[in-house]
Image (cartoon, rainbow, N blue to C red):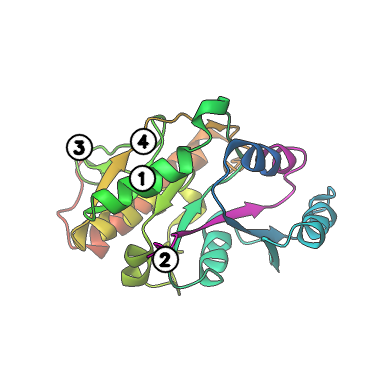
Amino acid sequence: METKQDKVTFVIPACNSMPHIQATIYSLYQSTEYPFKIIIVESESTDGTKEYVDYLAIVHENIKVIHTKKEGTVKAFNAGIRETEKDSHVFLCHDDVFFFKWYMRDWLQRCINILKNDPSIGILIPMNGGGTSGSDYIEGFIWAGSWSVLIRNDAIEKLGKEMFLDENFGKGFGDDIDMTYRINKFGYILGKTEFWIDHHRLSEHRYENNTDAEKIKKQNAEYFRKKYKLAEFKE
């Protein structure tokens, strides 16, 4: 009896992402033979990104493009996740580039095998992904970033697609910690792969100065602690 193959959908936000979006898509096709779908969430680009991704959707039957307002990567990811099939694992990525040697073209299949062999793993991250939070969130909590992460389909269903990433976090700080924490609360753990994925960080948010960034980080940490009724953070 033939075993049903797991589905994988890559969700990629794209806003003024040329030429990095080209490298991301090209490297993905070159890096794996495992069948996949791509949902590109384009947001009011003015540099040719819109026209480029629309062209990709014409020439590649496994690529779908949706157009949204320019409201940040968290909302873009949520918009893409809502378009994924119910039984598909979802790979979130920004302007990542997948560079693997020819004998590692089964990397995506290996990732699927990890999820199959260990049902407790809800999120898979690359070797250079994720981080460890400080006491302003939860001291020592290991989290997965919202780039280059493969998320188990039933974990997505449990968290819900309507707002998979909490859009109340300002400008990209803390939403990934929150996502990992919520998935952990459902009993899933975080797993690491043996792969390293290049990330250009083109999608990182820009600030007027470091003070603005630190202010938003503090506000988001306070929101996280209130959300989960944790003790107030004392600097």
Figure quadrant of residue 114: top left
Magenta range is 1-24
The secondary element bearing badge 4 is classed as loop
Report the residue that reaches farthest toward the left. Answer: 231
Q: Which one is nearer the viewer's eye here, 173 or 147?
A: 147
Can you tell which of label 4 and label 3 is closer to the viewer? 4
Q: Residue at label 3?
A: 140
Nearer the observer: mark 2 or 1; the answer is 1
Q: Say whether disc 3 or disc 1 marks the residue closer to the N-terminus.
A: 1
Query: Dividing the picture into quarters, in which one does residue 57 lie?
Result: bottom right
Q: Amino acid at mark 1?
A: Leu
Q: Residue visible at 39% across and 62% down?
A: 3
C-alpha gap between disc 2 and disc 4: 23 Å
Q: Which amino acid does the dot numbered 3 rest on?
A: Gly
Tell me which label, 4 or 3, sits earlier in the chain: 3
Specify which label sits upstream in the sequence, 1 or 4.
1
Magenta highlight on residue 21 = yes
- Asked if the residue at tag 1 contacts the one at tag 2, i.e. Cβ–Cβ closer than 8 Å, the answer is no
Residue shown at 51% from the left, 71% from the top: 85
Q: Mark 3: few, some, or many residues within 10 Å (few <14, many ≥20)?
A: few
Measured Cα–Cα span from mark 3 to mark 2: 23 Å
